[in-house]
Amino acid sequence: MAMKLADLHTHTTASDGLQRPSENVRLAKAAGLAAIAITDHDTVEGIEEAILEGERLGITVVPGVEISTVANGIDIHVLGYYTNWQDEAWRTKLSGLLQVRDRRNDMILDKLRSLGIPVTMEEVIEEALRQGKDSGSIGRPHIAAVLLAKGAVSTMQEAFDRYLASGGLAYMNPPRLHPFEAIEWIREAGGTSVIAHPGLYGDDALVEQLILHGAEGIEVFHSDHSADDEERYAVLAHKYDLIVTGGSDFHGERQGEIFHGPIGSRTVDAAVLNRLNPAWRGR
């Protein structure tokens, strides 16, 4: 019997993706997947639409979220799966994180203006709406799209490399939740915590600290991981008996560029859903 596959890391217009949640599910169907996770940044607003489309197409939709945190000056992302995403107290907590994201966006725009590149929040919101966004968070990809439209850069990747990514001229990193807190929040919300794309942090000692603090899984397979990264984190997962996950981190396609990879480009056996879903534990 052929293995059923799942892409457990995708973004939608509920945060900084370019496709609606239902479109991500349709892309999963077209890719031959059995399951897809919706893991928008600091919001669960896209989950309901995706679940409805999944029921229509026979695709399992895993409710998720990707929480933005900072430790040792490094952006760390923690994925949360199967939280009580309809719970109002949990949604209120997440909305507080969106306020921090908004503050960071304002800081980035201030820095861009100081560099002689005038970008207003109204322009960023207009671009986000043009891309089909109607809820959730505004993120750096929306700012990057405005930089591209203004001719300040020639590609989205250049926008990040030159201005928006860590080390970029307009990169800003205001105080955020610590990843230890994110792990605890996810547990309190009834979910399972997974360290997202650890190969991007350049600090495996910190990754191990997150594991010792209670992270239950690690994203071994990711579009930006090398083969060496995947091997190293597979060994770490075995050492600590962690749940091994993987996903494309799909954000959509613009001018032929797909960020970070197409849906289905990084997958794991869909059987891992049994370990991710706390309702299955002990069975």
Image (cartoon, rainbow, N blue to C red):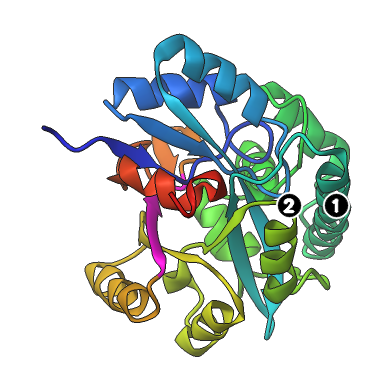
Q: Residue furthest left?
A: 1
Q: Residue at x 79, y 60 (%)?
A: 108
Could you tell me if residue 233 is visible in this image? yes
Question: What is the secondary structure assignment of the residue under circle 2?
Answer: loop
Would residue 115 appear left or right of 89 to someone viewing this image? left
Q: Position of residue 221 (x, y in %)?
A: 33, 58
Q: Is residue 248 magenta?
A: yes
**Where 27 falls versus 107 (above or below)?**
above
Q: Is residue 266 left or right of residue 82?
A: left
State how far apart marks 1 and 2 are (Cα). 10 Å
Which amino acid is tagged 2?
Ala
Residue occupied by mark 2: 189
Prevalent SS, magenta region: strand
On the rendered image, what quadrant is the N terminus found in? top left
Residue count near mark 2 (Cα–Cα under 10 Å), binned few <14, some 14–19, many ≥20: some
Q: Quadrant of residue 115?
A: bottom right
Q: Are marks 1 and 2 in contact (CB under 8 Å)?
A: yes
Q: Position of residue 6 (x, y in %)?
A: 35, 39
Of residues 158 and 97, the one nearer the viewer is: 97
At x 42%, y 44%, the residue is: 273
Q: Position of residue 268 (x, y in %)?
A: 30, 48
Query: Residue at the location (41% across, 22% down)?
Result: 59
In the image, 181: left or right of 262? right
Q: Which residues are magenta?
A: 242-249
Task: Decide which of 269, 94 is in the foreground and name it.
Answer: 269
Query: Closer to the camera: disc 1 or disc 2?
Result: 2
Q: Residue furthest bottom?
A: 205
Q: Upstream in the sequence, badge 1 or badge 2?
A: 1
